[in-house]
Image (cartoon, helix red, strand yellow):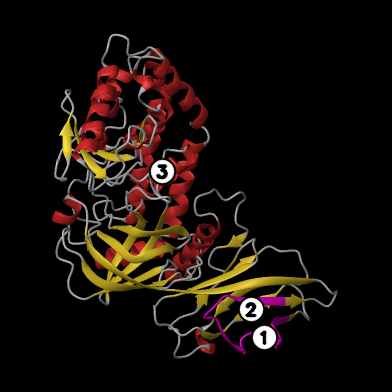
Amino acid sequence: MLNLYPINLNKYFCALLILATLCGCRKYDTVATSPDESVPGTGTITDVSTAAISSAKIELKNNLGKITEDIPCTINSNNEITAVLPNTDDSKKLVLTFATRTEGVTVKNKDTLLVSGKTVTNFSKPVNLVTLATDGSTKTYKVMVKLFTGLPILRLTTSGPIMSKDNYVKGTMVVDPNMEFDQPVTTIPLQAKGRGNSTWMLYPKKPYRLKFDNKTAMLGMPAAKNWALLANYNDKSLMRNRIALMLGRRLGADFTSDSRFVELYLNGDYVGNYLLTSHVEVNENRVNIKELKPTNTSDEDITGGYLLELDQKMDETYWFKTSQGLPFSVKSPEDITPQQLKYITGYMQVTENALFATNANDPVEGYAKYINVDSFLKWYLVEEIFQTTDARDFSSIFYYKDRNGKLGMGPIWDFDTAAGNVDYAETKNPASFWYIKYGKWFERLSKDPAFVAKVKQRWAQIKDNEVKQMFTDIDETAQYLNLSQKRNFTRWPVLNTYVYPNAVVTGSYDKEVAYLKNFLSQRVNWMNNNIAYW
């Protein structure tokens, strides 16, 4: 990152992160609609109001023993003043230094008059400051003092070490939303265990699965018991999963998870930046289909709901193969009955038979009788854009069938080896339809002129809107994670080290983000130029 201002670099990075944090709080899944008016590193904003606060900071000289250097504040166009203190235990009883646009402006916190550089204020919660100019004009500012990196902080304490993916360990998690989100429940009893496959076995920074004792909302995401903490150890941008999920939600890919970046402490040890997201499961706030119970055996009930994963590992209790050799694991119901297993096995085979029949393209009696074509299309586009390595008939490919419904695809999942972050597969090349399109089912779909027309039509609709927005998401996320990535890569110093299966080792976070952005730019340009040949 270029140093555009003659200021202390730490302060500049801090201010830049704060600015991105503000965007993340209010527009976590959307685009900023106008440029921020604040000046990085100065805590100033162009505001013509006579009652405006023009700059703010927390000065060392007025807060001795509480901070070690001046902390700049950012003032944004929503009249929010924000600072980030570097430590998680920093005192928030602080003196704020500020300047106003005109002389004679009074600044109050409720009935308390604030004198710049003098008045001690408790910023443990957001503080509203009301300014009054001599001409009678007023403004209200919301002041937020955040800690560490500005991201929410999770403190997970367990009764013993988390040693496996199979056995849960009891524990408690304390959630500090760091003023970003409402969090009614902040102390959560739970169980925790490992999760993932290669990510659990190969890397020292481990991913985790959390199972709360009670359904609990997390950082603005709907209540549920089961959650995943993705470590993103081999993805040095830290954001491939997040950016893909954002795109999936914009495109309406079925049941795409929401997510939040967090800082994780495990038994008192800082273990890095994580992405908190949904566990893939049948739930009214996750894969929202009928939950199939052992007693649901009538002709209507037995039709759903089922959650399946195309998974070459075949390590679930219940799985089956189709005649084309595709292995499907049953994710839900976990206690599937023989009758239910027979039904879904038969339905998947009938669907595959219809795909490969001579009348496959018939809109009434062909494959469209059994699959939700739009659902397949939305899943495909996200996976194709990201050139996802495992999406060609390997793993993390989820299907669902609701009661009396057709087969759909989703949720999208597992993008750490997507977008060029792989050295062993064709997906390292941004210029190819080969990988996903030629999975067995999608290769057959590509021979149907009606499906091909849908792909081209939908691409034309999204390429200059949702797809283009992806690059803004990358820039904003990189800014949002700026302080966090520094802490993460201090804890895990791998920016100069090959981590399987990296295609490149760039040596810096900024270059990792640039590589991701460049790969996706090449990918989108190639798709624009070649979609006619799909």
Separation of disc 2 and disc 3 at Cα?
Answer: 46 Å
Quarter location, residue 362: top left
Q: Which residues are magenta?
A: 107-130
Separation of disc 1 and disc 2 at Cα?
Answer: 10 Å
Is residue 351 visible to us here?
Answer: yes
Would residue 147 be counted in the magenta stretch? no
Q: Residue at x 36, y 42 (%)?
A: 411
The residue identified by callout 2 is 98
The residue identified by callout 1 is 114
Q: Amino acid at mark 3?
A: Phe
The outermost residue toward the right is 135
Is there CB contact under 8 Å for labels 1 and 2?
yes
Q: Say which element carries label 1.
A: loop
Q: Which mark is residue 255?
A: 3
Would residue 123 be counted in the magenta stretch? yes
Q: Is residue 472 above or below residue 215?
A: above
Q: Between tags 2 and 3, which lies in front? A: 3
